[in-house]
Image (cartoon, helix red, strand yellow):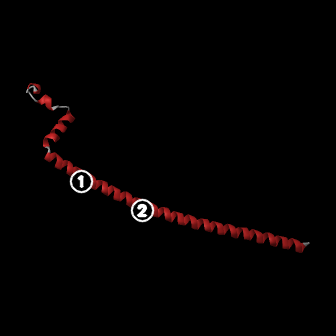
Amino acid sequence: MKAVAEVSESTKAEAVAAVQRQCQEEVASLQAILKDSISSYEAQITALKQERQQQQQDCEEKERELGRLKQLLSRAYPLDSLEKQMEKVGIGMASLLPWDLEGC
């Protein structure tokens, strides 16, 4: 009877050890998957940051170009620019003229 109990305990211990090994292998596998996922996401984040930085640089460059073109346009058509500025402050061209344009 004692021998049967010892064999039974030994079998239980082996089964527990096997389950522990299996759990450790699964944990190691999950850790490897997690590590790969983290590396992949870090690479994606780095790429997205670089893309965002490039887009910001492109935007700044386009804003500078737009400013330059607006400046050239205002030099080429100074009256249009003046008229727009006057419209902003609420002064129409007709109110500046002392004579009646309809009579011309």
Residue hosting label 1: 65
**Label 1 CA crowd tier, 10 Å (few <14, some 14–19, many 20+):** few
Residue 11 occupies which quadrant of the picture?
bottom right
- Between 102 and 85, the one lying in front of the other is 102
Secondary structure found at label 2:
helix
The answer to the question of whether label 1 and label 2 lie on touching residues, with beta carbons closer than 8 A, is no
Residue 13 occupies which quadrant of the picture?
bottom right
Of badges 1 and 2, nearer the viewer stands: 1
- Quick check: 31 left or right of 77? right
* Residue for point 14% across, 32% down: 93
Query: Residue 50's x, y, as percent?
Result: 38, 61
* Residue type (three-letter) at the residue carrying disc 2: Ala
Q: Give above or below for 37 relative to 67.
A: below
Query: Residue 4's x, y, as percent?
Result: 88, 72
**Label 2 CA crowd tier, 10 Å (few <14, some 14–19, many 20+):** few
Q: Give above or below for 33 relative to 97.
A: below
* Residue type (three-letter) at the residue carrying disc 1: Glu
Picture disc at residue 47: 2
* Residue for point 20% across, 34% down: 89
Q: Give above or below for 83 relative to 58.
A: above
* Residue for point 40% across, 59% down: 49
- Between 3 and 70, the one lying in front of the other is 70
Q: Earlier in the sequence, mark 1 or mark 2?
A: 2
Q: Give above or below for 79 relative to 58.
A: above
Quadrant of the image for the N terminus?
Answer: bottom right
Query: Residue 41's x, y, as percent?
Result: 49, 61
Secondary structure found at label 1:
helix
- Between 84 and 17, the one lying in front of the other is 84
* Residue for point 38% across, 59% down: 51
Quadrant of the image for the C terminus?
Answer: top left
Q: Residue furthest right?
A: 1
